[in-house]
Image: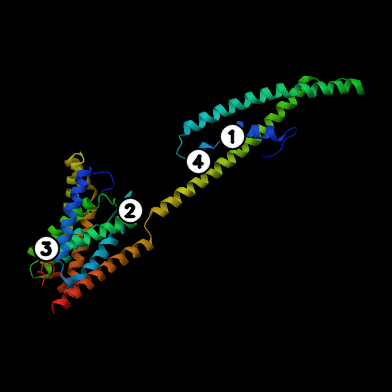
Amino acid sequence: MRAFPGMTKETGYLFVSRYTGYSPTQPDVRIRGGGKEKEEELSDRMKIARLSFLLFCLAAILLCNAPPVANAQGAGTAASGSAPPTAQSHDLSQVEKCEQVIALLQQQRSLLTRELAQIKRELAALRESMSQPGLLEVFAGIGYILGFAGIAFFVHSKKSSRNS
Amino acid sequence: MHIADGVLPTSVAAGSYAVSLALVAWSVKKTRGDDLPKVAVVTSSFFVASLIHVPLGPTSVHLLIPGLVGMLLGNSAFVSIALGLLLQSMLFQFGGITAWGANSLMMGLPALVCGWLFERTKGATLLRHVCAGAVLGGVGVTLAGIMLALLLFTSGEDFLGVAKIALIAHIPVIAIEAAVSAFTVSFLYKVKPELLKTAFQAVP
């Protein structure tokens, strides 16, 4: 997770968990499910995640804006008397930051998805190759057969020697 | 052509187990001690033959050789095939352990039939040996397909439909097996004809 201006540890985790559906406490269904989930479910989940993230962003902007704006206004009027930065410009910068974060997260997500798909492909190939009987099994089987034949031969020779 | 676990009803699986075990016991009793090396070699060939995949269009088929095993081993063919199938199901996961009885019947009975027919039709000349070998090599696979359909019929499948599918899917196998059997029989006839003669001799 790359840092962005104004990000604290908590907000960072919240952003990540809201946006990607990953949280340290809840198991990630997509990874642990073994890749059997349907695509529609994933995309639905993505939509919900995106929506909830946007709502969260809005709430965060509304909540977090008030104290810094008030402080800045207070400081501005007290110290220099120059025109205070308007709430609108703050809103804009916050939105820009959010967009930056979204872009970053999207970039990381696509990267992760690609890597995960590759790993899944490799896993499937590995499973396929492991299910194929190899040279070891062939020789093991032939060894068993010759071993059984040896036992049968032993019994046969015992019997024939007893008869003679 | 293997039946997997859980396809057959329990009663059929258990019944085929019992019949197979009885046939294995009979087959072991009929096996001559001097034939044991031959039985071991043919069993090994049967065990490995199913790994030889012949690419065929989008899919691939593999050899079964019940006919050839029957021709070479006669009465001992059943124990050979049962052992080969047991090891295949344990080592290769071909067919299920619970379906072992059914699989043994499916491949073993055609082998016995082919061996018996070969004994009666092979004559004394190379040509007759090769012809009988070719025909019975194909007949072995055909009978195995019919046995498969019969066994699946007990689990509620449509008999004729399954038989048709099994036979159509195995037409190339039938042709390949006929060629392989003919070649093997002609080779053995020229090189070591004793191998083709001991199939149904009585236990001394």
Chain for numbered disc 2:
B
Q: Establish whether labels 1 and 3 are both on one chain.
A: no
| Direction from residue A69 to residue A22 in the image, left or right | left
Report if the CB atoms under discs 2 and 4 are less than 8 Å apart. Answer: no
The image quadrant of residue A82 is top right
Q: Establish whether labels 4 and 1 are both on one chain.
A: yes
Residue A35 lies, in percent from the top left, at 47, 40
* Element under disc 1: helix
B121 or A24: nearer the viewer: A24
Tell me if mark 4 has few (under 14), some (14-19) or many (20+) residues whose alpha carbon lies within 10 angstroms of its own: few
What residue is disc 1 on? A20
- 4 or 1: tag closer to the N-terminus: 1
The label number, if any, that marks residue B118 in the structure image: 3
Tell me if mark 3 has few (under 14), some (14-19) or many (20+) residues whose alpha carbon lies within 10 angstroms of its own: many
How far apart are the two marked residues, 1 and 3, measured between alpha carbons? Answer: 70 Å
What residue is disc 2 on? B93
